[in-house]
Image (cartoon, coloured by chain):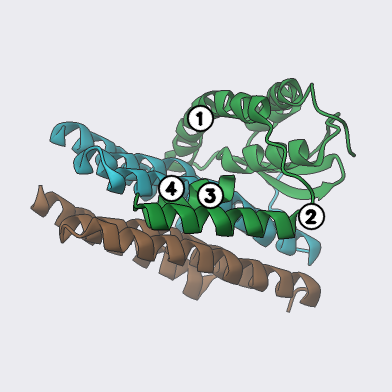
Chain colours: A cyan, B green, C brown
């Protein structure tokens, strides 16, 4: 059981590191939000499932799943609100230079 | 109902007094907030949404592997573009579910919603074609096919 | 297992540093808001990892739930305000 949880947590950390690299590296707001949503969806899922495996069955696992469902419902709302504010106030999306 | 489940999950105690208090308060709040109407649960709809989630999760894994390959590529071969999607969904809840699914999938994000037109920002040609093929929308239309249209 | 969770905590703190670079450096204000959202997601996970490290998960999970809800309200308020105000 410990080995399974270590595997899940390491996979989640991998996605989080990729997302942090993306946040530093990508060129504009819209593409950076993709990197943030990568962390939110898959990284958080894998890490919380790993911790739930470590906890075993019980009340704590149930509560961890509640936090996970909350993240899955709330994070798209926040990302959409931020991006819509950016779009309506006139930030131009970055385009690939056509040469 | 959903509020009562939330109460039980948050408090996580199964004594009689907690359960009774949670039942009374959650139904009172639901009754006040829903315009004093009787509460009709839609079990078949919830069951279909629950069956839709594993497929969505498969899509999330697929596109996040693709997106991490794009980010870690040394030349950064991204080609962001705005795509306008015209959906045929006839429910508020269905449009909300569609927008949430698109935003939750890494690589695509909903920028603007106007009744049932969506503007989607996609990271690459492959991902924007994935949006335009309307797989997610046909699945959601399948979920909501029995309900009364209200849009 | 405890040392493993300790290293996970250290790595998460370093990742928060990467997001903090984006908050301090960001060209527009929306970059900063986005970086703060990423930091709050990391903080929720960091709370639960700290709880597992010190073996008191049931308390820290309640804290992280409240933090997620407060973060929703704050981020929505900031986004709404910036949407009405326009690009500074």
In this rendering, the answer to whether A85 lies above or below B116 is below
Instruction: Say whether residue B68 is left or right of residue B37.
Output: left
In this rendering, the answer to whether A24 lies above or below A73 is below
Q: Nearer the viewer, mark 1 or mark 4?
A: 4
Q: Is disc 4 in the same subunit as disc 3?
A: no
First in residue order: circle 1 vs circle 3:
3
Chain letter behind tag 4: A
Residue at numbered disc 4:
A66
The CA distance from mark 3 to mark 2 is: 18 Å
Per the image, label 1 sits on a secondary structure element best described as helix
Per the image, label 4 sits on a secondary structure element best described as helix
Instruction: Say whether residue B64 is left or right of residue B124.
Output: left
Residues marked 4 and 3 touching at CB (< 8 Å): no
First in residue order: circle 1 vs circle 2:
2
Q: Which mark is residue B36?
A: 2
Q: Is disc 4 in the same subunit as disc 2?
A: no
First in residue order: circle 3 vs circle 2:
3
The front one of B139 and B125 is: B139
Where does the image place residue C79, in percent across and percent down from the top left? 68, 68
Chain letter behind tag 1: B
Q: Is disc 1 in the same subunit as disc 3?
A: yes
Residue at numbered disc 3:
B4
């Amino acid at each position: 059981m410990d080995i399974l949880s270590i595997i899940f947590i390491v996979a989640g950390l991998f996605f989080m590191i990729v997302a942090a690299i993306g946040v530093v590296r990508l060129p504009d707001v819209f593409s950076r939000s993709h990197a943030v949503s990568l962390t939110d969806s898959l990284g958080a899922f894998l890490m919380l499932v790993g911790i739930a495996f470590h906890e075993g069955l019980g009340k704590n696992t149930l509560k961890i799943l509640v936090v996970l469902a909350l993240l899955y419902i709330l994070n798209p709302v926040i990302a959409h609100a931020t991006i819509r504010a950016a779009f309506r106030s006139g930030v131009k999306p970055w385009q690939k230079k056509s040469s | 109902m959903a509020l009562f489940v939330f109460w039980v999950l948050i408090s996580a105690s199964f004594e009689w007094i907690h359960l009774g208090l949670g039942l009374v308060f959650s139904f009172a709040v639901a009754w006040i907030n829903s315009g004093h109407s009787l509460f009709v649960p839609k079990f078949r709809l919830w069951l279909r949404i629950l069956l839709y989630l594993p497929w969505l999760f498969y899509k999330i894994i697929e596109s996040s592997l693709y997106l991490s390959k794009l980010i870690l590529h040394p030349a950064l071969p991204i080609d962001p573009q705005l795509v306008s999607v015209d959906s045929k969904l006839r429910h508020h809840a269905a449009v909300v579910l569609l927008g949430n699914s698109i935003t939750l999938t890494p690589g695509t994000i909903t920028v603007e919603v106007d009744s049932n037109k969506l503007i989607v920002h996609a990271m690459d040609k492959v991902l924007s074609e994935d949006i335009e093929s309307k797989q997610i929308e046909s699945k959601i239309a399948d979920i909501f096919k029995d309900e009364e249209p209200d849009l | 297992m405890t040392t493993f969770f300790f290293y996970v905590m250290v790595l998460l703190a370093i990742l928060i540093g990467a997001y903090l670079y984006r908050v301090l450096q960001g060209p527009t204000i929306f970059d900063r808001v986005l970086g703060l959202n990423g930091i709050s997601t990391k903080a929720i996970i960091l709370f639960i990892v700290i709880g597992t490290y010190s073996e008191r998960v049931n308390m820290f999970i309640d804290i992280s739930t409240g933090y997620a809800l407060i973060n929703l309200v704050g981020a929505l308020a900031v986004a709404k305000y910036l949407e009405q105000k326009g690009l500074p």
